[in-house]
Image: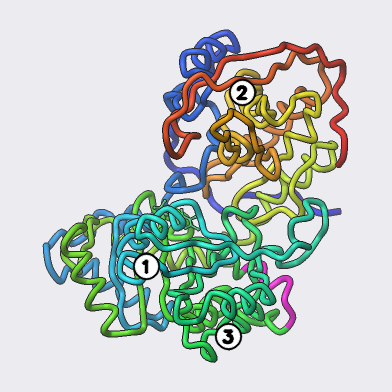
């Protein structure tokens, strides 16, 4: 019998969360136009909107905050961070930024431009936006077999090497400004990328003389999967695995709000001196001097400590297993989830769970709203609310899948919080429901999910929904 999954920390400071009534939440949600993104966080009981910048710092990190050196140039905190990151990445040039997208804007601003292409396993949305903003094109290359939501593959985040080679040939290698490997593959279920896959990309980059960029926001979580799923790495430490992978890349961008275990911060690292000079100039222009990049000294101190803590075996094991705990139990209960469970989030297939709500009525949003009203749980639709498109005639092209993401903040919630989330899902699954779809009342010209407003349509009474599929 397996033992209870226990958090490898004690609680020394508490942040109260408010328990509200269903009637209160109903009203609060109505006031946002049924878009929980617009809720005040005080009205949320368990917030699974994102794992970005929502983690808890350790006592060592808080002590580091006090020790932070706030000098404008050459601060001790910066030197600590630089030393840590050079050792981790093996890259000579390290720049601090306020968050991942600042690194992206600087790097792709220099490498991108009209007629250029970036190829990736999957570009994260800010990565894609920063590339496209330069006039360049971002292309995702995932193999067909990884698209199957219920098939177990150990490294479902891997890029499709065959399409990578054929894309380079058809677009012309001189037009490829970089290959971006996202680890773990955030927009694709938080699925891991194998070392073998990055090694194969390295060989192609060497042959074709193309820059390899690692978007390594969750590189520690990825290392966990490599140690436990890829042969040859059983005896390696998590940090050694990350060190090896980073040494395969030419540049490294990082949002420290994820595996940096901090609430704000980012990094931009590279091997090439000439490129580093260009990046440094851009950094100074918009972010700050090259030894703080828009961060306070205390932020950099906490990041230096977080980047070491994140590789601790007790932490990583708890992290990956607690995400799997939620995902596996949902699956056992008959709630359809993307399989296998990734590192930082569980993705529920609301299209399968609510087959009576058509894609253009946003089944994902129906689940998001139900989770909030019933349980005070905040999640996000990453289905047609985020990716569905209307053409000029008003015809709707839905997303590939109607997914809802439950992202797990790091070191914040205990197993009983997660058990409560499971209870709410059980209720949603079992009880007779009056569930309606949604119609868009207002949508902004871009990044719709942030500010879209809905109205409810077609209430339907569903008796004991047994959620088709598994
Ligand atoms: C979060 C994230 C980014 C962007 O970082 P921000 O800190 O939110 O600006 C880029 N790539 C990936 C894979 C991410 O998860």
- Residue 346 sits above or below residue 340 on the image: above
Q: Name the residue under label 3.
A: 204
Q: What stretch is highlighted in magenta?
A: 224-231
Residue 114 in picture, x, y percent from top left? 37, 65
CA–CA distance between discs 2 and 1?
39 Å
At 71% from the left and 26% from the top, the residue drawn is 424
Q: Distance between the residues labelled 2 and 3?
A: 46 Å
Q: Does the magenta stretch include residue 111?
A: no
Q: Up-down: is 361 above or below 218?
A: above
Q: In which quarter of the image is residue 224?
A: bottom right
**Residue designated by label 1:** 112
404 relative position to 128: left or right: right
Q: State which quarter of the image contains the C terminus.
A: top right
Relative to 443, say whether 461 is above or below. above
Question: Predominant secondary structure in magenta?
Answer: helix
Drawn side of residue 218 relative to residue 368, left or right = left
Say which element carries label 1: loop
Q: How many marks?
A: 3
- Quadrant hosting ligand 1: bottom left
For mark 2, give the secondary structure: helix
**Quarter occupied by residue 307:** bottom left
Residue at the disc numbered 2: 369
Q: Earlier in the sequence, mark 2 or mark 1?
A: 1
Q: Which of marks 1 and 3 is in front?
A: 1
Give the image location of residue 414, x and y in percent: 60, 41
Q: Is residue 24 left or right of residue 231?
A: left
Q: Does the residue labelled 2 lie within 8 Å of ligand 1?
A: no
Asked whether residue 318 is in view, the answer is: no
């Amino acid at each position: 019998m397996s033992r209870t999954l226990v958090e490898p920390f004690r609680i020394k400071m508490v942040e109260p969360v408010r328990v509200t009534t269903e009637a209160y939440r109903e009203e609060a949600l109505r006031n946002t136009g049924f878009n929980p993104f617009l809720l005040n966080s005080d009205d949320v009981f368990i917030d699974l909107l994102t794992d970005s910048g929502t983690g808890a710092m350790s006592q060592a990190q808080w002590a580091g905050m006090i020790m932070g050196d706030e000098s404008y140039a050459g601060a001790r905190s910066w030197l600590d961070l630089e030393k840590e990151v050079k050792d981790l990445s093996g890259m000579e040039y390290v720049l601090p930024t306020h968050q991942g997208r600042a690194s992206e804007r600087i790097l792709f601003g220099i490498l991108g431009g009209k007629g250029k292409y970036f190829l990736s396993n999957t570009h994260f949305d800010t990565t894609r936006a920063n590339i496209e903003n330069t006039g360049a094109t971002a292309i995702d290359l995932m193999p067909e077999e990884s698209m199957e939501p219920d098939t177990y593959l150990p490294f479902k985040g891997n890029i499709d090497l065959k399409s990578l080679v054929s894309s380079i040939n058809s677009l012309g290698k001189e037009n490829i400004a970089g290959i971006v490997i996202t680890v773990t593959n955030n927009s694709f279920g938080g699925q891991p990328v194998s070392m073998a896959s990055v090694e194969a990309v390295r060989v192609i980059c060497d042959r074709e003389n193309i820059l390899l960029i690692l978007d390594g926001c969750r590189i520690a979580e990825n290392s966990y999967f490599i140690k436990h799923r890829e042969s040859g790495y059983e005896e390696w430490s998590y940090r050694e695995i990350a060190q090896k992978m980073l040494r395969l890349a030419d540049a490294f961008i990082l949002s420290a709000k994820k595996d940096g275990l901090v609430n704000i911060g980012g990094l931009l690292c590279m091997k090439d001196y000439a490129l580093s000079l260009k990046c440094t100039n851009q950094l100074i222009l918009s972010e700050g001097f090259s030894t703080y990049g828009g961060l306070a000294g205390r932020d950099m101190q906490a990041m230096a400590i977080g980047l070491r803590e994140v590789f601790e075996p007790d932490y990583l094991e708890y992290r990956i297993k607690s995400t799997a705990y939620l995902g596996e139990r949902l699956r056992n209960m008959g709630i359809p989830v993307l399989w296998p469970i990734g590192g930082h989030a569980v993705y529920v297939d609301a299209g399968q769970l609510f087959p009576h709500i058509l894609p253009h009525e946003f089944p994902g949003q129906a689940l998001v709203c139900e989770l909030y009203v019933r349980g005070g749980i905040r999640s996000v639709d990453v289905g047609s609310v985020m990716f569905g498109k209307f053409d000029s005639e008003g015809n709707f092209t839905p997303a590939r899948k109607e997914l809802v993401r439950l992202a797990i903040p790091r070191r914040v919630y205990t197993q009983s919080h997660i058990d409560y989330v499971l209870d709410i899902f059980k209720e949603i699954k079992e009880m007779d429901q009056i569930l309606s779809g949604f119609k868009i009342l207002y949508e902004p010209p871009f990044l719709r999910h942030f500010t879209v407003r809905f109205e409810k349509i077609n209430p339907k009474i569903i008796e004991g929904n047994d959620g088709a599929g598994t």
